[in-house]
Amino acid sequence: PGRTEHFWVLLMEQESLVQNVTVGSRVTSHSFTGVTPGTLHTVAVVAESMGIQSSPVAKDVYTGKTKAISVPVRFFLDM
């Protein structure tokens, strides 16, 4: 119903919230650091405009050996 004001980017592990951040509407990606290597995580993005939140869009991400996950925020909105 309007221009996106910001995004909530959520990182979950086994259905528990691990980290969350709020980023501005012009941000195109966010990196979560300190994640557990070799673990399946779920990343969800929610857009907010004028106090109205979108439905979350989520994707499972496997970390492999790394301790960081880079999330292309706009990719989620194009799904």
Image (cartoon, rainbow, N blue to C red):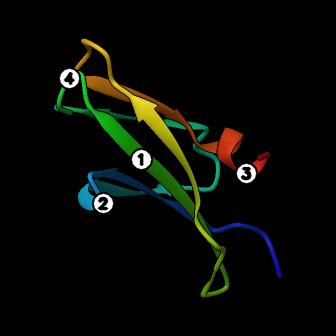
SS at badge 3: helix
User: To which residue does mark 3 refer?
Assistant: 77
First reached walking from the N terminus: tag 2 or tag 1: 2
- Distance Cα–Cα, label 4 vs label 3: 26 Å
Label 3 neighbour load within 10 Å: few <14, some 14-19, many 20+:
few
Percent x, y for residue 69?
A: 37, 28
- Say which of 14 and 20 sits in front: 14
First reached walking from the N terminus: tag 3 or tag 1: 1
Name which residue lies at 61% across and 38% down: 28
Q: How many discs appear?
A: 4
Mark 4 vs mark 3: give the one in front.
Answer: 4
Lateral position of residue 74 relative to residue 63, left or right: right
Q: Is residue 39 above or below residue 21?
A: above
Mark 3 vs mark 2: give the one in front.
Answer: 2
Name which residue lies at 67% across and 85% down: 50
Q: Is residue 53 above or below residue 8?
A: below
- Distance Cα–Cα, label 2 vs label 1: 8 Å
- Distance Cα–Cα, label 3 vs label 1: 16 Å
Does the residue at mark 2 contact the one at mark 1 (Cβ under 8 Å)? yes
- Say which of 42 and 52 sits in front: 42
Look at the image and tell me in which quarter the N terminus lies. bottom right
Lateral position of residue 27 relative to residue 40, left or right: right
Lateral position of residue 6 relative to residue 34, left or right: right
Q: Is residue 75 above or below residue 68?
A: below
Query: The residue under label 4 is which amino acid type?
Result: Pro
Q: Say which mark, if any, is on residue 42.
A: 1
Does the residue at mark 4 contact the one at mark 3 (Cβ under 8 Å)? no
